[in-house]
Image (tube, grey):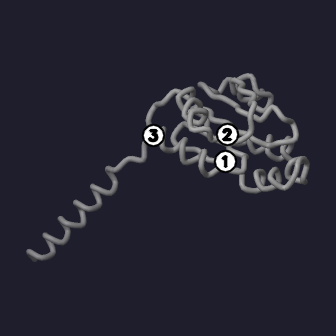
Amino acid sequence: MKKSVVLFTLILTLGLIGCSQKNEVKDIPVNDIKSAINTESLLPIQPISDVNAKEFYAFENVKDKIKEGFVIQALINVKLQDVFVVKTDDVDSIKKAIEDYKSNSLKLFGDGYGGEDNVDAVNNSILESKGNYVYFIATKNAKDIESKILEIIE
């Protein structure tokens, strides 16, 4: 009987510890994320276009769901370098808008427009969310940029 009580207590304690660890993110302004990406020179293609996410055409139908965000793209129209970070309370709507953008606007790049690097960038693009942040990265070093974003918000 004593062993059962000790075992039950141990299992309950471990369960409570495991459940109490929250996978929360910090409340960081997206401009801090953008600055870190720019400071680290993670954007291989320069010059860049830097637009407020609420003004970007792909977010036209969901701009009222965006708290803050940015869209960075290469100014050279034959090179793909997309980095979007959006803070929102409606992650699913923002992800859907980005999926539509990827299906429609990035189709030419995926078909080879601008070279093999663009095809790789589309095929290896990252669309993820963490907490109330949604990020999309389509560039040849997408994993490096994602690591920087996660380092800042986690």
**Quarter where residue 38 is shown:** top right
Q: Nearer the viewer, residue 46 or 153?
A: 46
Specify the amino acid type for callout 2.
Leu
- When the figure is inspected, residue 146 is found, relative to residue 55, above or below; the finding is below
Q: Residue 134 in the image: x percent, y percent? A: 61, 39
Specify the amino acid type for callout 3.
Val
Q: Residue 19 in the image: x percent, y percent? A: 34, 54
| Count of marks placed on residues | 3
Figure quadrant of the C terminus: top left
| Distance in Å between CA atoms under marks 2 and 1 | 17 Å
Query: Disc 1 designates what residue?
Result: 127
Query: Disc 3 designates what residue?
Result: 25
- Please tell me which residue is depicted at 42% across the width and 47% down the height of the picture: 23
Query: Disc 2 designates what residue?
Result: 43
Nearest to viewer (mark 3 / mark 2): 2
- When the figure is inspected, residue 109 is found, relative to residue 93, above or below; the finding is below
